Amino acid sequence: MRAWFIGAAAIGLIPVPAYAQTTQAPEERSAQGDVSVTIYNNDLALVQDVRQLSLPSGRTRQEFPDVSAQIRPETVTLAAAGTAIVEQNFDFDLLTPDKLLDKAVGQTVTLVRRGPDGKSQVRETAKVLANNGGTVVQIGDRIEVLDGTDRVIFPALPPNLRARPTLSVTLDSAQGGARPATLSYLTSGLSWSADYVALFDEKAGKLDVQGWVTLNNQSGTTFSNARTLLVAGGTAGNRPIPVQPRPMVRGQNGVRIQPGTESAERERLGDFYLYPITDRTTIANAQQKQVGFLNVSGAPASRAYYYDNPWMGTQEQARSVDTVLRFTTAREGGLGDALPAGTVRVYMRDARGQPQFVGENTLGHTPMGSKIALKTGEAFDVKVQPVVETRERQGDSRWRTAMRYSFTNARPEPVTVEFVQSGLDRGWQDTRIIAESQKSERLNAGQAQWTVTVPANGEATLTATFDTRY
């Protein structure tokens, strides 16, 4: 919901600049250089960090603080003129109070405690015995468990604890001098998703849409003033939401998509679409940031009703049909872009002109030119009751099944329901509709569809008889 209220602009879908959801306090100066971050779907990112190094000739150990805490060390490469990597180590044991106590097991520390009068302070020497869900110490001849009120003073900082995630590399340089070095690596903890805010005007048949990219950084590191590139698609090992295949088929979430064949005017990398963020941006650790990438006003759209009945589906009570929002991503008469996978949240204005939330659903990666039927909910007053009226065996291998579908409409205007009977085929591809009260369209071997008009405050009935092998 935050994207909707990024200024009153969201109500009228006026362009809005990049906006960070959280405000970060000033941080310690980063050791990073010129940073570029490419973020893929599903928890994968490529970081490229150009730093200036001053190297002596021969072997030397260089430390690179402020790398991602979730770096994949096996993916690290370092490119610097006349320099080769001999060895690299990633120190991810970060300095925390618990880690200090872990490293102090078997060591002697000083405890600062309140004196008997409750005001003065008393110092005692203690040996740390364990730090497992609580700290156990030995003071003289007694064993105690610290209760959190004692201040612990350590004699020194363990050498293998780091204040920041640090990569250390042993380099062999042919000659000394300053030079740029490009550090590249893959990391987890950086992800992005798309969110869409859609305002539907049913009377005008128009749809206004804002698309937002939400960046999420849980990598343990802030990336300052970074060039940021977003990649829509699934690299090996990642599983984005799939696009539904042709023909238009209902998905598990009630979304039907007929994939388009138009090429979006976006840069592509192999089979991926790229969504660059125009300006450099700081992706702070533990932050979500939203950036707009789509702003469309007045795209044609309509509301429809849909119901998919399974084979032999019979109901004792009428069921609500699906409420569906229809629109397209085509260049002409649509949103005019390829849509990365994300959630579409739909709003409509009430009688007072206030936008109200009416439903949401998820899209997979959707090519430009696609036709979309997005389920936003279930109709309150448009219902259908499927009933198996008769079922008779016809010989040894065939059955004749008569179905009746009763529709009701409590709305003050007529409605049209796209009614689909599924499950007609079990691999034989010889199911026949031998009688029907209204002409159907055969979508495929397993589905037939009827377009049923239900009058205002009225009823309608559809009947069909099927000849099948089962």
Image (cartoon, rainbow, N blue to C red):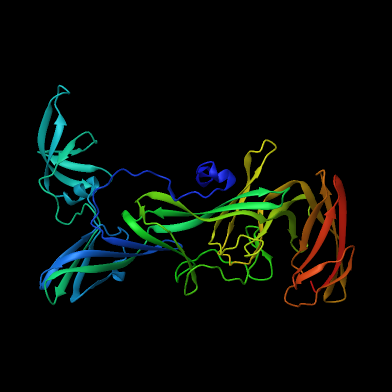
Tell me what residue is drawn at x 45 percent, y 70 percent.
235
Q: Is residue 252 left or right of residue 80?
A: right
Determine the image quadrant of residue 4: top right
195 is higher (above) or lower (below) than 263: above
Please state which of residues 134 and 373 is positioned toward the viewer in this rendering.
Answer: 373
In percent of width and height, residue 379 lies at: 73, 48
Tell me what residue is drawn at x 12 percent, y 75 percent.
175
Q: Quadrant of the C terminus?
A: bottom right
Please state which of residues 131 and 408 is positioned toward the viewer in this rendering.
Answer: 408
Please state which of residues 396 and 334 is positioned toward the viewer in this rendering.
Answer: 334
Determine the image quadrant of residue 126: top left
In percent of width and height, residue 215 lies at: 43, 54
Tell me what residue is drawn at x 86 percent, y 64 percent.
464
Q: Is residue 23 left or right of residue 460?
A: left
Asked if one can make out residue 314 in the rendered structure from this viewpoint, the answer is no
Asked if one can make out residue 79 in the rendered structure from this viewpoint, the answer is yes
Judged from this view, the residue extending furthest toward the top is 117
